[in-house]
Image (spheres, grey):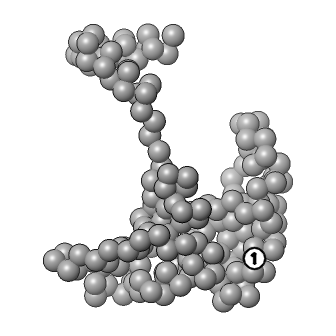
Amino acid sequence: MLLAFRFKALYQSLGMDLPVCANLMAFMHNKRMRFLHTMLRVGNLQRSIDFYTQVLGMQLLRTSENAEYKYSLAFLGFEGGNPAQAEIELTYNWGTESYDMGTAYGHIALGVPDAYAACDKIKAAGGNVTREAGPVKGGSTVIAFVTDPDGYKIELIQENSRAHQHGDAASVDPLRAA
């Protein structure tokens, strides 16, 4: 109730009248936002599809092409993708073979039952493990990193790790370093 009062005061301070504020509050209460997908630009669509399906075990969910604007899309995920899980959208802009990574992009994280076994399986499938499985610096969560063919980092987080299991702020490990 206190939160609703604070939102009401905020919206009124922005010049919104009470009916508009009430409608917005009702919408926010009844409609949940969901994480749908993350888009990655790739230099070779088939090479990237092969990595995400054959090395990481994702499913190719759907593809599309837009000849007018010269791009192709591939959506991949686990368990059929949306709505159960978010997806990865691979975007290939025709004729662009590579992209600069920049310094803003971090990584995608995937939960795995056993990070050590996942690394072994990824290496056996030809994947590039860039940080072997082990606890994060200063913590107990077991992580590993792999890199896809375009240089994107993917963190593997072992699901039975202490911080992942409990999920409360006090048990979350400090910064993770790759």
Q: Residue at x 49, y 74 (%)?
A: 60
Could you tell me residue 170's position as x and y percent?
A: 76, 36
Could you tell me residue 29's position as x and y percent?
A: 44, 25
Marks counted in the figure total: 1
Is residue 159 positioned above or below 39 on the image? above
Could you tell me residue 88's position as x and y percent?
A: 48, 65
Judged from the image, the secondary structure of the residue bearing numbered disc 1 is helix
Query: How many residues crowd mark 1 within 10 Å: few (<14), some (14–19), many (20+)?
Result: many
Q: Residue at x 52, y 60 (%)?
A: 81
Q: Which amino acid, mark 1?
A: Cys
The image quadrant that residue 51 belongs to is bottom right
Is residue 118 positioned above or below 138 on the image? below
Q: Residue at x 55, y 55 (%)?
A: 85
Q: Residue at x 68, y 87 (%)?
A: 125
Is residue 19 positioned above or below 47 on the image? above
Per the image, the residue denoted by label 1 is 119
